[in-house]
Image (tube, rainbow, N blue to C red):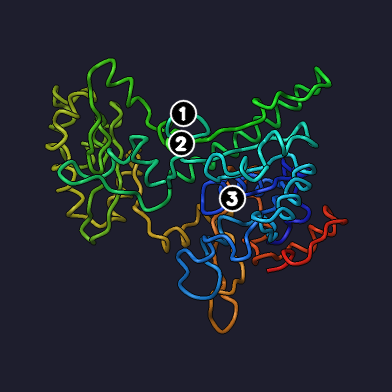
Amino acid sequence: MTGAAAQRFPLDGVRVLELGSYIAAPSAGRLLADFGAEVIKIERESGDELRNWRLYAGETSMLFRTLNRNKKSMVLDLRTESGREDVRRLAAQCDVVVENFRPGTLEKWGLSPAELSRDNPDLIVVRISAFGQTGPYAERPGFAAVAEAYGGFRELVGDPDRPPVRVGVSIGDSIAGLYGAFGAVMALYDGLRRRDASPDPLPLDDRIVDVALHEAIFSMMESLIPDLDAYGVRRERTGGRMQGIAPSNAYVCADGLSVVISGNADAIFGRYMQVIDRPDLAGDPRLTDNDGRWTHRDEIDAAIGAWTGARTREEVLAAMEAAGVPAGPIYTAADIVADPQYRARDMIQEFDVDAGGDGPTRVGFPGIVPVLGGRSLPIRSLGPELGEHTDEIRARLLPDGSGGEEGQP
């Protein structure tokens, strides 16, 4: 992207060592890299397995290119003492280490947070695992699908008369990555405050950010537990609805396209019913508050569905916009790419990429969130080739290292 070199990034000067694979830890690393941190991603000689996930052509998936953008790739073999020693030396020159091995793995390799902090007492270590570093489940393996089940999320996704389903992305991994990045920045800030008040570094426990996948999901479950304890209410799957909130649902239009309309606020509901030519529902005393509307949600949804089913999506959305009722189309990827709002804020950034064809393919990638200065920060580079930066990192940070057999894939 043009202008990236001159752009100011908030985390310029921060260096991160990423000992992560798949999605969770790399998502944390991506967020830090997006905002200017130098993120050195350590990969084994065969590379992060994500390079082959959803690989439809070529040698590197667009999923890997996306989740590992703005990073550098270095090949090391952590099964060897020389590889582990290189990690120690790199950690001594980094601000943050991010890892997502099963608890105990780093300790087994002699790379515990205490060991990595030996020559760097300010080092922050972000640890992402299925169940956290402590507790009876700590040593269990687990991916996001399992975490979503343990966290209460899966139980609420889908229709009530069918088994729970999964959303179409690894939401548990991504949320854990968000917490990992937030924890790293929080600890960096805490360290800066500490240095203003004392020459002593933060205690080790304050520099370890422990993110459990299932807890990351659980933290998003709103009042799931309080509702059970306070009212004896057990949340259930409600399909396209949100329990206790009505009307808010997806509706099919005459052209076969769908929209989401959220007219559940009391003042909005009256306007909403006028738009769909049901003033009787607008004035119905049973429906003046949300509890009443939830009780009669099937009746309300049937009226809305009949109205949308007789009009095109464009007609439905125009009517809702004119009345000030929150509504939107259910977008496909193609819809997102064509949408002017995404374009106006640089939320689709295009690069020429080897996608397995005869030549480079122009590919759009999602922009950086949150926005600073009105537009997405520019993506500086896509997920790197395997070991692309090994020599550069060795020359700059490990000038006396042996390198040799594990320096290049």
Tell me the quarter of the image containing the C terminus.
bottom right
| Disc 2 crowd, CA 10 A, few/some/many (<14, 14-19, 20+) | many
Q: Of discs 2 and 1, which sits in the foreground?
A: 1
| Disc 1 crowd, CA 10 A, few/some/many (<14, 14-19, 20+) | few
Residue 187: which quarter of the image? top right
- Viewer-closest of 117 and 212: 117
For residue 244, above or below residue 166: above
Q: Are marks 2 and 1 in contact (CB under 8 Å)?
A: yes
Residue 180: which quarter of the image? top right
Q: Which residue is mark 2?
A: 131
User: Label 3 vs label 2: CA separation?
Assistant: 16 Å
| Disc 3 crowd, CA 10 A, few/some/many (<14, 14-19, 20+) | many
Left or right: where does residue 105 sit relative to residue 113?
A: left
Question: Is label 2 in a helix, a strand or a loop?
Answer: loop
User: Label 1 vs label 3: CA separation?
Assistant: 22 Å
Q: Earlier in the sequence, mark 1 or mark 3?
A: 3
- Viewer-closest of 196 and 125: 125
Q: Which residue is mark 3?
A: 20
Q: Name the amino acid type tagged 1.
A: Gly
Question: Where residue 129 appears, x then y in whole percent?
Answer: 51, 40
Question: Where residue 156 appears, x then y in whole percent?
Answer: 28, 38
Q: Name the amino acid type tagged 2.
A: Phe
Residue 70 appears in the picture as rendered? no
Q: Which residue is mark 1?
A: 135
Please tell me which residue is depicted at 17% across the width and 24% down the height of the picture.
292
